[in-house]
Image: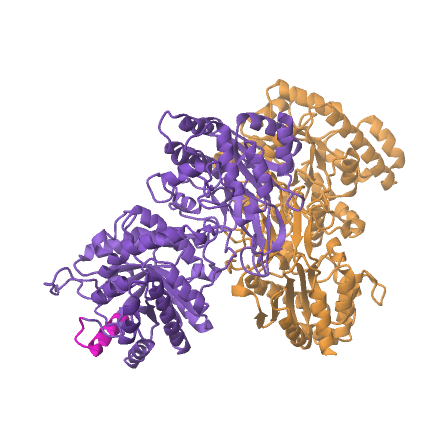
Chain colours: A orange, B purple
Amino acid sequence: MVNETQQSCSASSSSRSDAGSSSGSEGSKDSSRCSTPVLDADRHERLREKMRRRQDSGDKWFSLEFFPPRTANAAVNLISRFDRMGAGGPLFVDVTWHPAGDPGSDKETSSMIIANTAVNYCGLETILHMTCCNQTKDDITAHLQKAKRLGLKNIMALRGDPVGEEWEEEVDGFNYAVDLVKHIRHEFEDYFDICVAGYPKGHPEAESYEADLRHLKEKVFAGADFIITQLFFRSETFLRFMKDCQGIGITCPIIPGIFPIQGYHSLRQLVKLSKLEVPQEIKDVIEPIKDNDAAIRSYGVELAVSMCRELLDSGVVHGLHFYTLNREVATTEVLKRLGMWKEDPRRPLPWAVSAHPKRRVEDVRPIFWASRPKSYIYRTQEWDDFPNGRWGNSSSPAFGELKDYYLFYLKSKSPREELLKMWGEELTGEESVFEVFTCYITGEPNKNGHKVTCMPWNDDPLATETNLLKEQLEKVNRRGILTINSQPNINGKPSTDPIVGWGPSGGYVFQKAYLEFFTSSEIVTALLKVLKKYELRVNYHIVNVKGQNITNAPDLQPNAVTWGIFPGREIIQPTVVDPVSFLSWKDEAFALWIEQWAKLYEEESPSRMIIQYIHDNYYLVNLVDNDFPLENCLWQVVDDTFELLN
Amino acid sequence: MVNETQQSCSASSSSRSDAGSSSGSEGSKDSSRCSTPVLDADRHERLREKMRRRQDSGDKWFSLEFFPPRTANAAVNLISRFDRMGAGGPLFVDVTWHPAGDPGSDKETSSMIIANTAVNYCGLETILHMTCCNQTKDDITAHLQKAKRLGLKNIMALRGDPVGEEWEEEVDGFNYAVDLVKHIRHEFEDYFDICVAGYPKGHPEAESYEADLRHLKEKVFAGADFIITQLFFRSETFLRFMKDCQGIGITCPIIPGIFPIQGYHSLRQLVKLSKLEVPQEIKDVIEPIKDNDAAIRSYGVELAVSMCRELLDSGVVHGLHFYTLNREVATTEVLKRLGMWKEDPRRPLPWAVSAHPKRRVEDVRPIFWASRPKSYIYRTQEWDDFPNGRWGNSSSPAFGELKDYYLFYLKSKSPREELLKMWGEELTGEESVFEVFTCYITGEPNKNGHKVTCMPWNDDPLATETNLLKEQLEKVNRRGILTINSQPNINGKPSTDPIVGWGPSGGYVFQKAYLEFFTSSEIVTALLKVLKKYELRVNYHIVNVKGQNITNAPDLQPNAVTWGIFPGREIIQPTVVDPVSFLSWKDEAFALWIEQWAKLYEEESPSRMIIQYIHDNYYLVNLVDNDFPLENCLWQVVDDTFELLN
């Protein structure tokens, strides 16, 4: 919240200023496979129930507020930030409503679409803000219907700022947040959890502090489930407010809004817009260092940490809500110092879970999209049912078409110049493509001194798990086995293993060795001869861009390649190699050669023709070694293939 | 087929004469857990497709014909025979229609109910015979509808024998088998696979051999899928018949009916009824040895083997149909000598599969019914959906009530006198009950010199797998931990392991250690204290007859305790410990104390009161050790419990 206008002001500057750091050290995390440490219960509970459960168990929580960015590139960055900050374990994130930015539209930067991305693609419990003044009932209903359709389950109901000075109450219109609360409950009954705003110092436009408290009570009694407060500078401000609320019969959770001061200008702007007064003791510290951003931020963190500690120690505060201003460093720092940043290296499933209610039961996916979970979620968003426990025989419904204009389906997060530096300004032949793959695997700089930190099929550096295979991968990529996905075999490691573990503790995880790569038809011919020797042990699928398909999979059945055994649970098998969906993945995997790589170069240029040649002539191959308790035989298969070729 | 009247004649004598051997050495097989080696494909294909596939692959097959017995006890024996002979891998069994025996009724001995048992409870592909003469269209339709409802998918369409000599064609009635074929196709379209009878020597009532061939062609062209022939004595009889059929355009499979001669009298009776002539060379051998049953059977086996070899060697015969006369030895012997008896020690799943089409996808069951699969099938017959891949959370539909009057739900296969010898003519206290359990485990005779080969919860001797735990089981049963179900932990044994293996080869099977027992409240109190130490490792459910239930299972979720990993497949988890269905099992398990054991004794007798006391006061306990890679800790749990008690 803070104030809608204020937030949009700081949007462009703050998102830019943090952009650098996001591709720095924090970016090296395996964000594409790691998602929020969602528990089973978390996938089924409503937000208000989660809050209650955390309060009952004494488990303190935090939440994070973001605003919609102005440009598509900033949106891409914000989504990466959702992934990274989501890993710290927020109970929810919220996305502000930005009336000037067409907030309910399908634009990449609208409030609606950013919230959609947070809930569906980043798997975060999400609150969408919504303001009501100067809007018709029909517009509001349409926004709410759309939010529901997208899987959003929580609304922050706000009045919003009237446009201009001459605002007057409309008789049948939405004049106050309470009107919106009533409307939501009337039209959508109990579907949404509703949050409303509280003002510890009273709303600047309210007749009095007491009158404002009465307004708040009206909002709660109209159906709001909890309250998030405007920011404040002293813990006693909040604690008195909370006591006053309880004094007039408000019993729902009240969550303090925390604003870590991050810079002189953003603080001044905020104060102006929110009509809050900065305490003299804070001004006294800040004024002398106003040109030293680092010093101000450091002070801001210090201040926030000590205020948060006071709040938590009071015993009446169970969660903290952070106004992040879309920045990462200060809030993360505060949370880490409070011991509330709960980065869990283990994965709830070996892929990013979506928080859409329809996908609650989903617990198995094809391994092909392991590095592109958002694309998978996008392409399956129209499914009515999601596989639960078993993928099933050829039963996967149709995969949606890829659209290359949207945020993350075919575009790279990195700008063209950076990609050219990594993947080559000019290619001289297939070997220079092999070289790019090899540098990505080894982490060594390419011949122009640039590290290759992403590939069309992997927007992030190599996963920790894949590092286990680094040496062998390097060897085969050098020779034209261009790997895009792989996993080692695992024969019952503890589920708490920091590299390959996932799921609840006390369990055991297993994997079949998997290798997926592009390669030439010459190598495929030799490979097929070698595979005859491994017929009973290795399953393979080999396909080219035209769909010519060679496989030994029985009856097109899926092959489970990751599974886990847990105390008191049924078996979970989160990834499978499914012959049917492999053909959909094939389209996507081949398209990435052109959309991300070939199109970096001029039409008809030799570089572009090299990529086009690979696209047209190479095969996409996947291999599974079924004998997971033995030593992975796939390297032997590849060695035998090269030997046959010599 | 042979001839309906003839078959019913030999029914009582032959089923009795074999009854002794069925509880002999062959009976020691673990028939309750082992079922036909059904492949995945077998569960989904129609019979005619299975025949085609076997023909294409050159994989010779056999089938077995049975007739409905006259008494309920004989029916119980026949069902055991289905289990044993089913283990040899017949492509199907068929059950003759016995017009004099109320064949479509719900009696335990009706053709309909015997066929129902074969398909649903023994998991055998089954053909139900049906005759049409002297029956109304409505009756026939009702029979067919009932057959369909019971999950029968194949009908052998026959005319049947007219009653009396004065039979005349009815104008609109069913005068010939072809009328029945047409009726089935008209009313049920392609639902049923239809078989018809062929007569290699011509039907005795046909005008001529040629006329009979034309009738056969009519039956095939009316919609029959394949032909089974009347018996014959020389292979050339069949081969000429087959050639003649093909000559007039019959292209469907023609399966020779094989009748191993098993005795002088049954042969004479057969010849009289079927109006067949026994070749002189056979008569010459048999007449001199007519009083030596063993010699005749031995000759009959010899004769059948050499005729079958000639048929198979001809290249045009792909399957053999055996008229068993409900006897086991001769047919089994012929098949073994032909190398066609394919007893596979491995289980398709660790429980008996049902061949009902509705249950095709079923692949997970609660472990509680491991020794009582027929009871489980009976109690779940009304379910619309069967669990596939995942049991799911508390989602199991209601279990049907147990009815104690039916064949195998609560009754023991053994007669009362035998049970009294095993379980004690007179009990002197709880300790004498402990003694019965202990003798069952050890295989040692009880103090009266009788071996305990079954228990109320286990109608068969101890499974081979349970033998692995014999020593520990003996120890705990002696002290009043009365075990009724258990399995060792298995950490990835090959699926071909003769003791614990199941499923296709090349896979690995796993188990969590499981122990289920009745015990006193005193022991339960100590056990619960001990279990606190094992809280994270051991899941338990403890319940008494009144339903008082103590468990540490999270959210009533099922716990997978058997699973298998196979090449190119999803994970299969055939057995789970499900907290919800455990309460249904509890009712059954407690009821067996009374129905099978207490009722052996007079009311008010001390023996009966001892069992009644145990029923009223003991608890049923199950324990799962989740840490399957470690040494089974359940024995330690029990030891600790006894130690605490001392």
Residue A605 at least partly seen: no
Query: Which residue is the extreme one toward the left?
Result: B166
- In front of the other: A99 or B434: B434
Horizontal and vertical percent position of residue B377: 41, 47
Read off the magenta span: B205-220
Horizontal side of B446 relative to B323 (left or right) equals: right
- In front of the other: A52 or A277: A52
What residue sits 47% from the left and 72% below the top? B57
Residue B102 at least partly seen: yes
Horizontal and vertical percent position of residue B435: 51, 34
Query: Which residue is the extreme one toward the top?
Result: A247
Residue B58 higher or lower than B149, as above or below? below
- Quadrant in the picture for the C terminus of chain B: top right
- Quadrant in the picture for the N terminus of chain B: bottom left
The image quarter in which residue A46 lies: top right
* Number of numbered discs overlaid on the protein picture: 0
- In front of the other: B492 or B202: B202
Horizontal side of B471 relative to B291 (left or right) equals: right
Horizontal and vertical percent position of residue B194: 31, 64
Horizontal and vertical percent position of residue B486: 55, 42
What type of secondary structure mainly makes up the magenta span?
helix
- In front of the other: A433 or A265: A433
Q: Is residue A523 magenta?
A: no
Residue A500 higher or lower than A163, as above or below? below
Horizontal side of B590 relative to A53 (left or right) equals: left
The image quarter in which residue B160 lies: bottom left
What residue sits 26% from the left and 62% below the top? B265
Query: Which residue is the extreme one toward the bottom?
Result: B247
What residue sits 39% from the left and 53% below the top? B21
